[in-house]
Amino acid sequence: MNHASGQSCSPLTETIGTVVTVSTVNQLKAAINQANASGGNMTILIADGTYQIASPSWFPYITASNVIIRSLSGQRDAVVLTGGGMRPTASTEDIFLIAGANITIADMTLGECGNHAIQTTGSNADGLRIHNLRIYNTYEQMIKGASGPGGDGADNGVVECCLFEYTAGIGPQYYIGGIDIHQGRNWLVRDNTFKNIRSPDASLAEHAIHFWEGSADAIVERNIIIHCDRGIGFGLGSSTNSGGIIRNNFVYTSRDVGIGLESSPNSKILNNTVYTTNYFNSIEYRFATTTGVEIINNLTNKNIAARNGASGTKSNNIENAQSSWFIDPEQGDLHLSEKFSPIVNQGLSLSDVTDDIDGQTRPNESGPDIGADEWYPIQLKTSIILQGAYDPTLHMMNNKLFSQIPLTSPYAEEPLTIDDLPTATVDWVLIQLRANDGTSVIKNKSALLLTDGRLIDPANHDEILVFDISAGRYYLVIQHRNHLSVMSSVTLPLSSTTIVDYDFTTGPDKFFGIGGAVQLQSDQWGLWAGNGNGKDDCFINIIDYEVWFLSAQNGQSGYLHTDYNLDGQVTSMDYVLWFNNEYYGATSQVP
């Protein structure tokens, strides 16, 4: 699934103060001790490798401030810090316990420990930044924000671009969660993915993201939650939260509520998409102390409900979404599968919501959409060569047919009419986007082929081709009226945020199947010419000769299927193309 965030999820590059590079467990321990002894202002860079750094007898306890700890390579899967395994321990086993301010942990993997991957303790741990981590298989909550001796917790934390997961598809016990913050104020949780935070027994796991015990004013945005017992929670029972915004999240829960407010006044739930199974509410707000809440522009498949005396504003939500409305709900991909008129442009404009889950600007059209996904058409660029028009001396196609090319596309699938043609036009082609089965056509588009191989939009002559369908993986098929069709060798991840540039001309690996394209020169590949009886035929055979023979016998010229070399005349040169390709056994590999 595409999840292009609204800010950078790239590896960090910054350093502060003294810079130390480590490559062994002992060196890492020594560097942490050095940072604590010196009071901080230090960067620790960890070389690629696996480090069993935590045990019940010793684990990294950071009391200094202004410390960056990150991988040297920037590859989070290449640096792995572990404890002794995901099991109960007699005493604490955290990968990191943070008691200093302005600590950054970035670009590595943490897991297999008896308690938490990262725990903060007290208000001294303000300003924690957790960036681009993979956190997996912890015996308790993955990130724990605990209050200190004075009853205060860490404030102004940031958790971004991380993956939280249990690799077995379920957790080891019920007392687990993703991010669990007590008495934390002004946190930002964005652009993370949470998977399989599920209890193995009747008791529910804690939320993927949870702020309570006096927390306030967190912003939780652009996260994807997949197959977790519970999604996002502010407050719990009589334990309070105040304020905060939950916006632009995809939430798929398997046992309980997707988003819940409990004893959480003045909180906002805006433009989320929530798909709930095995529970009756997708979003709920509970208890009389929950007042002044705003629940607006959310897209859910179950109810949005007030319970136990809660009150607030509920407006402009859709509560009956069907699974078919989304790309793949069970995998957490809640992007819209189609441009649904009850959703697109039907949201209220909110000053708190200016983008969507992919970081795209709202609104795209006349108004914002309901849910986390703002509808944008997908985009791509592509290039092909038609064998018949190719000039090997120029390394490009000719446009000898230009004066004969009609202003209306010859393809019934999209018979588009335009006002003029660019002078470099070779011919019309038809583009198809197909589903993963390779046969189901999702979208057709007529396009113009230029002499350099680029396909352009006939309306605006732009090489960025726009398709009004949802982001996803599609096969790309190119059809021509007298050349054999071709298809991309793989499905392409098409979206509105990243433009795929698929160049068929560079090699046989670009084409589906074996023998589906012709080698024109050492570095140039193209579509087989000589298919005179229609683009849907998969073979060059005697029928193509017979239709050519009738045209040649009558001395025909113009815009004809039997003009295989696209020069406007039906001659023996077209026959030579057909003969060579038929002799070779040219066949389209498109299903």
Image (cartoon, grey):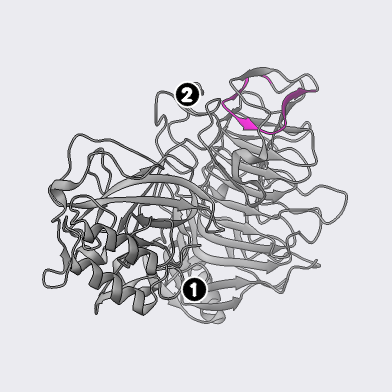
Asked which secondary structure carries label 1, the reply is helix
Q: Position of residue 300 (x, y in %)?
A: 65, 33
Amino acid type at circle 2 is Leu
Tag 1 residue: 31
Q: Main secondary structure of the magenta part?
A: strand
Q: CA distance from mark 1 to mark 2?
A: 47 Å
For image coordinates 41% across by 73% down, the residue present is 20
Which of 315 and 128 lies nearest the eye of the viewer? 315
Q: Residue at x 44, y 75 (%)?
A: 514
Q: Earlier in the sequence, mark 1 or mark 2?
A: 1
Numbered mark located on residue 350 in the image = 2
Quadrant of the image occupied by residue 272: top right
Residue 301 appears in the figure:
yes
Q: How many numbered marks are there? A: 2
Left or right: residue 498 versus residue 24 is left
Q: Residue furthest front?
A: 553
- Closer-to-camera residue (145/17): 145
Up the image or down, 490 lies above or below 162; here it is below
Q: Is residue 464 visible?
A: no
Q: Is residue 163 magenta?
A: no
Residue in the image at 32% along x and 44% along y? 410
- Horizontally, is 254 left or right of 28 in the view? right
Q: Which residues are magenta?
A: 291-307
- The amino acid pointed to by label 1 is Ala
Decide which of 340, 96 is in the foreground and name it.
340
Let me know if residue 305 is in the magenta part.
yes
Instruction: Give the crowd class for mark 1: few <14, some 14-19, many >=20 residues within 10 Å.
Output: many
